[in-house]
Amino acid sequence: MSSLVRPSFIKEDVSLQGFNSFRFDAKARYFAIISELSALSDSLRWANAQALSITMLGEGSNLLLTGDIQGLVLINQLKGISLSEQSEPELTVSAGENWHQLVSYCVESGLSGIENLALIPGSAGAAPVQNIGAYGVEVKDVLSQVQVMDRRDASLHWIAASECGFAYRDSLFKRDWAERYFITAIRLTLSREFKAKISYGGLSKRLPESPSLKQVFELVCQVRSEKLPDPSKIGNAGSFFKNPIVNEASYQSILADYPDVVAFSVGDSWKLAAGWLIDKAGWKGHRQDGVGVYDKQALCLVNHGANTALALLVLEQGLKQDILQKFGVLLEREPVQLGDLPSI
Ligand code: EPU
């Protein structure tokens, strides 16, 4: 196929409202759902020949869509899971698989390693981008390799997890590699010998002494459903802010004013619970212009019915200013921002 002719599966001016979990309405200039690698390489060649920017989305669950996207938007729906059992069980998972369904499949198959990451919204291919984490486990702990398509020539490569620059909610896929690779599959090394990791977030208090894999999975599902908004019912992108890391002096000055501050020591610094800061500042359950702060978890901003991200950006600005004034801490956004920016 000539790379100058637009493949027929690429549509024009498509609303992305159903493709971001905040459910903000904005359009993609060009749009395609990708379920085959060949469709991905054809799209890439066409867009490169037109010098169009390309944005790959999974389930749009860690995304703040602030306006139209001018280039080509691809929705990754590459499917397939394969298990190989040599010395350790290894799963190869196509990037468009749903993350929670993958976790459920592992638990049913007796494979442990990602049970603490149950009910995290999104696709398997998005998991490495922000190194998803919950209850003391991060995907980097079990990830061995990531398969990518190089955007320059559509070639496929496996990259070792150790090369991906993983850190708290961070990886090279978010930074240096954002314009270079699409994630097409991930490979996880799991275990048939279950060792519960339940010291974090009060999980152990709610479990018997030697819990089973299924019990841990079910408890994580329960705890998350109690605290976090279900994106199929209320628009949100999970934690809207990262937990900020501050130095000893800032921590001590906050502690002097707020002896109940929730903080965890990390090396020489302190990680503060952003949810606690926002809650303490009185924002929990706050609503304005169709958006708000979730009433059960102040770390989540939610969409009660706004059509665009404008009201949310205004809320974010007010909230950040207030937290800065009260605690001297600048909150940093967690979801990825995409699209034209409105002026606020
Ligand atoms: N807190 C409050 N009020 C609130 C929310 C939290 O006082 O409204 C306090 C809690 O009582 C607790 C502390 O803040 O003492 C920490 O809160 P919590 O354990 O609920 O979660 P977190 O540390 O704020 C992180 C992740 C979540 C992950 C949970 C569980 C970040 C930004 N968020 O939240 O990840 O599920 O731990 O491991 O690291 C996500 O990334 O989208 C996400 C939901």
Image: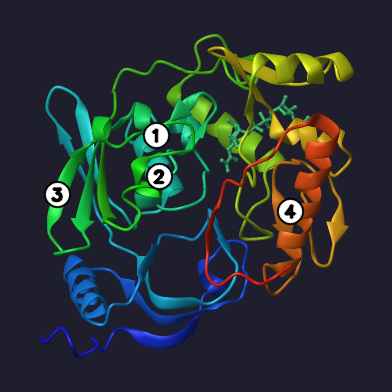
Q: Earlier in the sequence, mark 2 or mark 1?
A: 2
Ligand 1 position by quadrant: top right
Q: Which mark is residue 90?
A: none
Mark 3 burial class by Cα count in 10 Å: few <14, some 14-19, many 20+: some
Q: Nearer the viewer, mark 1 or mark 3?
A: 3
Q: Where is residue 204 drawn, in percent x and y?
A: 60, 15
Provide the secondary structure element on which disc 2 rests: loop
The spot of residue 76 in percent (x, y) is 34, 64
Q: Where is residue 218? Give x, y as percent.
A: 55, 33
* Whole-number angstrom distance, CA of label 4 to CA of label 1: 28 Å
Q: Amino acid at mark 1?
A: Val
* Camera sees residue 1: yes
Lower sequence index among marks 4 and 1: 1
**Residue 215: horizontal and vertical position, in percent?**
52, 26
* Residue placed under numbered mark 1 in the picture: 139
Q: Earlier in the sequence, mark 4 or mark 2?
A: 2
Q: Say which amino acid is labelled 2.
A: Ala
User: Closer to the camera: disc 4 or disc 1?
Assistant: 4
When the figure is inspected, residue 63 is found, relative to residue 319, above or below; the finding is: below
Could you tell me if residue 112 is visible in this image?
no
